[in-house]
Amino acid sequence: MDAPGLIVVIPAYNEALTVGAVVAEVQQACTGAVEIVVVDDGSSDATAGAAASGGAVVLRLPVNMGYGAALRLGFRYAASRQWDYAVVLDADGQHIASEIPALLAACRSGADLVLGSRFHPDSPVAYAVSRTRRVAMGIVSRVLRLRRGVVLTDPTSGFWALSRPGVELFSQQLPAGYLDNLLGLSLAARAGLCIEEVPVAMAPRQGGEPSARGAALAFHYVRTLLAVFIGGRT
């Protein structure tokens, strides 16, 4: 079998109802050879079986370790494979697979890490979030701009396209906690990687539950902001 031009990493926790459809949509959206990897983060439902039935490679964590740990495992697997570009998207149906070519186009133009932004001025569909989340994301954006010189409208987006340097960096250094994809952006900026955004549409969550809410979500935002802020300038 020829080496795929694209590897797609999908972290999943109790997403049996949606992950199969997400895998199928990725297959339909991507031309050429593509390897789809679902990282089952200790799910208690049939997530692994649904992903495997759809044709994905399944990596399983023995217990629920969180989004960052699942993402890092996926990056470590990706770093061991041969491919041209990588994509990360969620298993809950929020990220629309037909938007993948737009992210890859930016990678092919020289970006190392491309985020699909819900809040970019050119995004085709307005995306509703709570006032608390929007304020928190605004603070994150300002801190990243101040400390890392990176201007982003949607820093919490988990819809990414990456070049090999980005995957190799994250496979070794991405922290393993919730919202630590934000620390990944800080790491990428410090490493001198080119970070860009492209406007995308996103759908409402099709299944599953948010990883954190209320006080827990606020705690994770504050912890992440402090980690980015005290890490020094680029």
Image (cartoon, helix red, strand yellow):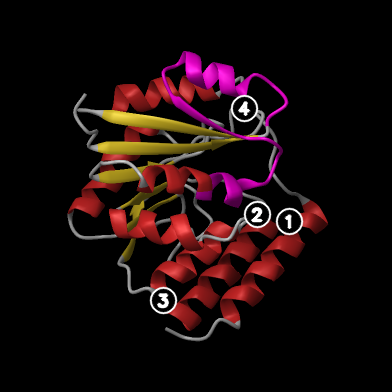
Separation of residues labelled 4 and 2 (CA atoms)? 17 Å
Q: Which residues are magenta?
A: 43-72
* Residue 230 on image: x %, y %: 60, 83
Query: Could you say which disc has been placed on residue 178 in the image?
Result: 2
Q: Secondary structure at mark 2?
A: loop
Q: Earlier in the sequence, mark 2 or mark 3?
A: 2
Q: Earlier in the sequence, mark 4 or mark 1?
A: 4
The amino acid pointed to by label 2 is Tyr
The amino acid pointed to by label 3 is Arg
Compared across the picture, whether 231 is left or right of 164 comes to: right
Q: Earlier in the sequence, mark 3 or mark 4?
A: 4
Q: Which residue is mark 3?
A: 190
Please say if the residues under marks 1 and 3 sit with CB atoms less than 8 Å apart. Answer: no
| Residue 187 among magenta residues | no
Separation of residues labelled 3 and 4 (CA atoms)? 34 Å
Query: Could you say which disc has been placed on residue 15 in the image?
Result: 4
User: Is 141 drawn above or below residue 34 in the view shown?
Assistant: below
User: Is 29 drawn above or below residue 114 in the view shown?
Assistant: above
